[in-house]
Amino acid sequence: MLDKFDPQEKKQLAGDLRGEAREAAQTAKLNRSLDTAFRVALMLIGMASTVLAGIVNAHGSGAPPEWQTLTLMVLGALSTGLSGFALTQFNFGGRARSWQKKADALIALSTELLYSDPEKAGLLARVTKVRSWNDSTPPDEAPLVASE
């Protein structure tokens, strides 16, 4: 005979899963916000660099003040460095998708637990798999619903 959840276990685990789903959804929202903020910051740095380059160029034949030249170099290097680093290290959009998939999968597992009579070991194995998803889980490796 297959081992099943008793009503108290169902209620407890479903509550835990819904709480974890809320946390995962909040993390997804945070990553979406960070993604937007990072893109806006890079855009502003690029715009500042472009405007300053125009100001430096408008000096005509004379040499621009040293602070303008140094600021232009710093902004250009900052924009290039952050863009390159961000593309290789911070995939906020991918992280947001992974966390949202985790939240959706946890809600699906909670719903399955409450409205069907799943086999205990199988459901717990899928819960463990979904709980293992984190920032380093590529979005494509986190299916919408964990399978057995």
Image (spheres, rainbow, N blue to C red):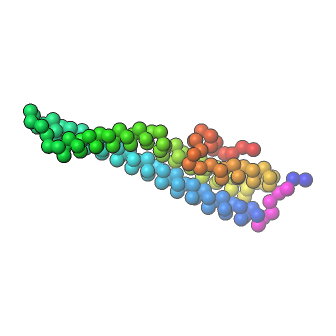
Q: Considering only vertical position in the picture, is 63 above or below 34?
A: above
Quick check: 44 left or right of 57? right
- For the view shown, which residue lies furthest in the right direction? 1
Residue placed furthest toward the left: 61
Determine if the magenta segment contains residue 98. no
Q: Quadrant of residue 48?
A: top left
Q: Nearer the viewer, residue 100 or 54?
A: 54
**Residue 7 shown in magenta:** yes
x, y percent for residue 86: 43, 42
Residue 43 can be seen, yes or no = no
The majority secondary structure of the magenta stretch comes to loop
Q: Name the one closer to the observer, 7 or 40.
A: 40
Q: Could you tell me which residue is drawn at 57 percent across and 58 percent down?
A: 23
Q: Position of residue 79 (x, y in %)?
A: 33, 41
Tell me the residue at 61%/61% (across/down). Answer: 19
Q: Residue furthest front?
A: 66
* Any part of residue 141 in sight: yes
The residue stretch that appears in magenta: 3-8
Compared across the picture, whether 81 is left or right of 2 comes to left
Q: Quadrant of residue 51?
A: top left
Q: Residue furthest bottom?
A: 8
**Where is residue 138, by image quadrant?**
top right
User: Which quadrant does the C terminus fall into?
Assistant: top right
> Number of numbered discs present?
0
| Residue at (49% x, 53% y) in the render | 29
Rendered residue at 80%/55% (across/down): 120
